[in-house]
Amino acid sequence: MGKRQSRPWIVSDELWSLIEPLLPKPGRKLVEGRPRVPDRQALCGILFVLHTGIQWEYLPQELGFGSGMTCWRRLAAWNEAGVWDQLHAVLLKELRSKNQLDWSRA
């Protein structure tokens, strides 16, 4: 989790194991259509947009994260479900347990 990488929007297996249990389970599809983009891919798309600053509509489909609208909707749903506050608490606990909090930047 503490190792820097060249593509910070890619979620490591270690980090995903902390995030996945916090995500709400998807509801039943009301209408048949395309398969749901997996949560991990949607999260990578969200992180890509936040890291690069591009507009949601310009999220490159070639990256495999789903459309910008899909990622935006997932971000909104997770926000409404309180995922980000829970994730913040989990990450702080994890960093504290590994003595990796850098208070010099606080």
Image (cartoon, rainbow, N blue to C red):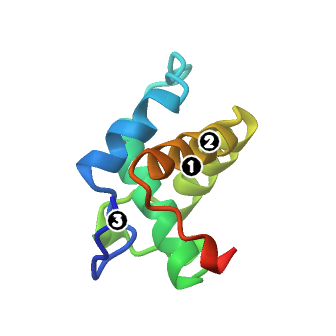
Q: Which residue is mark 1?
A: 92
| C-alpha distance separating marks 2 and 1 | 5 Å
| Label at residue 34 | none
| Amino acid under disc 3 | Gly
Residue sitting at x 55%, y 26%: 24
Q: Which amino acid, mark 1? A: Leu
Q: Amino acid at mark 2?
A: Ala
- The residue where tag 2 is placed is 89
Name the quadrant containing residue 83: top right
The one of 86 and 92 positioned closer to us in this rendering? 92
Q: Residue at (53%, 52%) from the top-left corner?
A: 70
Q: Earlier in the sequence, mark 2 or mark 3?
A: 3
Please tell me how crowded label 2 is: few (under 14), some (14-19), or many (20+) other residues with Cα within 10 Å.
few
- Give how far across and how far down residue 55 sits, in percent: 62, 78
Q: What percent of the width, then of the height, locates residue 47?
A: 49, 66
Residue 106 placement: quadrant: bottom right
- The residue identified by callout 3 is 2
As drawn, the residue found furthest toward the right would be: 80
